[in-house]
Amino acid sequence: MNINSNIKNIDLKSAKIYNVLGRLVKDIPVEKGVSKLNIDLSHLSKGIYLLSLKSADKSTTKKLVIN
């Protein structure tokens, strides 16, 4: 499974996926000036995860459910 996230006007610094226990399960390399982020989730088991996106001055966390 891939997630395509359009990131406009944001200088993305990091993208990480955590399990519900707060353990880091994937640290996604982010290239400078990226406008689209493709994340391969095929190695993750069924469950709930958190996707954390951070820039220099903003951050957001989104829930991911893998069935």
Image (cartoon, grey):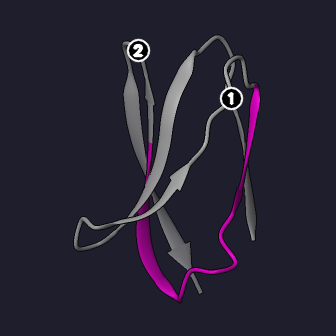
Q: Nearer the viewer, residue 15 or 61?
A: 15
Across and down, in percent, residue 28 comes to: 57, 49
Picture residue at 40% right of the left edge, 36% below the top? 60
Tell me which amino acid carries mark 2.
Answer: Ala
User: What stretch of residues is rendered in magenta?
Assistant: 35-52
Rendered view: 15 above or below 31: below
Tell me which amino acid carries mark 1.
Answer: Glu
Per the image, the residue denoted by label 1 is: 31
Under circle 1, the secondary element is loop
In this view, the residue farthest toward the left is: 21
Magenta span: predominant SS is: strand
- Identify the image quadrant of residue 55: top left
Decide if residue 41 is on the left or right side of residue 44: right
Where residue 22 is drawn, which disc sits there? none
Across and down, in percent, residue 53 comes to: 47, 38
- Identify the image quadrant of residue 36: top right
Q: Does the magenta stretch include residue 50?
A: yes
In the rendered image, the quadrant that contains the C terminus is: bottom right
Picture residue at 62% right of the left edge, 35% below the top? 30
Per the image, the residue denoted by label 2 is: 56
Q: Does the magenta stretch include residue 53?
A: no
Across and down, in percent, residue 58 comes to: 38, 20
- Identify the image quadrant of residue 7: top right
Rendered view: 5 above or below 17: above
Q: Earlier in the sequence, mark 2 or mark 1?
A: 1
Mark nearer the viewer, 2 or 1: 1
Task: Count numbered badges in the picture.
Answer: 2
Label 1 crowd (10 A; few <14 / some 14-19 / many >=20): few
